[in-house]
Image: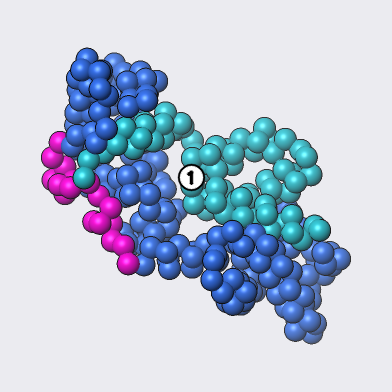
Chain colours: A cyan, B blue
C-alpha cells in the first residue's frame, strides 16, 4: 500500500491548521452545548468561541457529534 | 420540548419525582436521537436508540454535578447522549479492524513510501518524490512511534480518534494532545527546512 496525494494533502493541511493553543476533545465537548445554542439562536458562535470552531474544523470525531447534536436539537424544537 | 427549568430538572432527577423525570428525559433523548441518527443507522434504529438512551441516562445521572448551567439542561443531556451513541457506533463499526490493517506496508520501520498516484508530469513527479521523502524523514526522525502510528491510522486509514485511542490503551483526549504535539513538531521542522505548508500543498495539488 502506498500513500495517496490525498493523504499527504490531508496530513499537511492538518499541520497547516495547527495552533500553539488548541482545545482538546474534552474541552471542546465541555463547551459544545453553549456553542450550539448560540448557533441555533443565530448568534455568531464561531466568532464568540473561535477555539471551539477550530477544533470542530480539525477533529472529525467531534465534528460528527456536533452535526448530529444539531440535528437532534432541531427535532426537539419541532 | 419539556418546560422544566434547569433547576427543576436537577431537583426532579435527584428527588422524589425522579421516576417521572427520567421517563420525560428518556422520551426527549429518544426523539432527538431517532431523528438525528436515522441517516447513520440502517438496521434496528429504534432498538439501538433505546439502548443508547438507557446508557445515556445512567451517564447523565452520574454526571449531574458537572452540569454547569450554561445551556438548557436538555441540550447538555442530548450532548451526553450523542457521545454515548457515537462511542458505541464507532466501536461496532471498527470492531474487527486493527491499526496494523490500516497502516501502509512497512510502516513499522517506516521505510520510504511512494505515492500511489504521482503526477504524470515528470518534473512535478520528481518534486513530489523529494518532498515526500522529506515528510517521511521528519516523521521518522522527529515523531515517536506512537505519534506516527496514530497519525497514519487516522489520516491514511480513516479510523476515528476514539477507536485509535482504544487500541493504543489511551483515551481520545490524551491522543488528541499526542497528535497536537506531532503536528507542531512537523510544522516546526518544515519551517526549519525552509518550506511553508502552502508550498508543500501546491506540489501535491491535483495529483
The residue closer to the viewer here, A9 or B16, is A9
Residue plotted at (25% across, 22% down)? B120
Near mark 1 (Cα within 10 A), the count class, few <14, some 14-19 or many ≥20, is some
Q: Which secondary structure, mark 1?
A: loop
Q: Is residue B3 left or right of residue A6?
A: right
Where residue B20 sits in the image (x, y, percent)? 79, 81
For the magenta stretch, what is the residue range?
B96-112
User: For the stretch drawn in magenta, what is the main secondary structure?
Assistant: loop
The residue that appears at 42% across and 48% down in the rendered structure is B176
- Whether residue A46 sits left or right of residue B101 in the image: it is right
Q: Specify whether residue B98 is painted magenta.
A: yes
Residue visible at 40% across and 41% down? B180
Name the residue that disc number 1 marks: A59
Quarter containing the N terminus of chain B: bottom right
In this picture, is B179 found above or below B56? above
Q: Is residue A22 left or right of residue B23?
A: left
Amino acid at each position: 500500500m502506498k500513500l495517496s496525494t490525498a493523504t499527504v494533502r490531508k496530513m499537511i493541511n492538518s499541520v497547516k491548521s495547527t495552533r500553539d493553543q488548541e482545545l482538546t476533545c474534552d474541552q471542546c465537548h465541555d463547551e459544545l452545548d453553549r456553542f450550539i445554542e448560540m448557533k441555533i439562536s443565530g448568534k455568531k458562535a464561531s466568532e464568540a468561541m473561535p477555539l471551539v470552531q477550530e477544533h470542530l474544523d480539525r477533529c472529525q470525531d467531534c465534528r460528527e457529534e456536533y452535526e448530529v447534536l444539531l440535528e437532534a436539537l432541531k427535532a426537539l424544537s419541532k | 420540548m419539556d418546560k422544566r427549568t434547569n433547576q427543576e430538572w436537577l431537583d426532579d432527577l435527584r428527588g422524589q419525582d425522579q421516576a417521572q423525570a427520567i421517563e420525560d428525559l428518556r422520551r426527549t433523548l429518544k426523539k432527538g436521537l431517532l431523528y438525528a441518527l436515522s441517516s447513520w443507522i440502517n438496521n434496528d434504529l429504534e432498538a439501538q436508540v433505546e439502548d443508547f438512551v438507557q446508557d445515556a441516562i445512567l451517564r447523565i445521572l452520574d454526571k449531574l454535578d458537572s452540569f454547569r448551567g450554561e445551556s438548557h439542561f436538555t441540550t447538555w443531556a442530548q450532548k451526553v447522549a450523542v457521545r454515548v451513541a457515537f462511542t458505541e457506533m464507532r466501536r461496532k463499526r471498527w470492531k474487527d479492524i486493527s491499526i496494523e490493517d490500516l497502516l501502509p506496508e512497512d510502516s513499522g520501520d517506516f521505510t520510504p513510501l511512494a505515492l500511489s498516484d504521482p503526477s504524470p508530469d515528470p518534473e512535478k513527479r520528481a518534486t513530489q518524490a523529494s518532498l515526500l521523502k522529506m515528510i517521511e524523514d521528519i516523521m521518522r526522525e522527529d515523531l515517536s512511534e506512537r505519534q506516527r502510528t496514530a497519525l497514519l491510522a487516522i489520516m491514511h486509514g480513516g479510523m476515528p480518534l476514539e477507536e485509535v485511542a482504544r487500541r493504543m490503551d489511551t483515551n481520545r483526549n490524551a491522543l488528541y494532545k499526542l497528535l497536537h504535539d506531532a503536528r507542531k513538531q512537523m510544522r516546526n521542522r518544515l519551517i526549519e527546512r525552509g518550506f511553508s505548508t502552502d508550498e508543500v500543498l501546491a506540489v501535491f495539488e491535483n495529483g
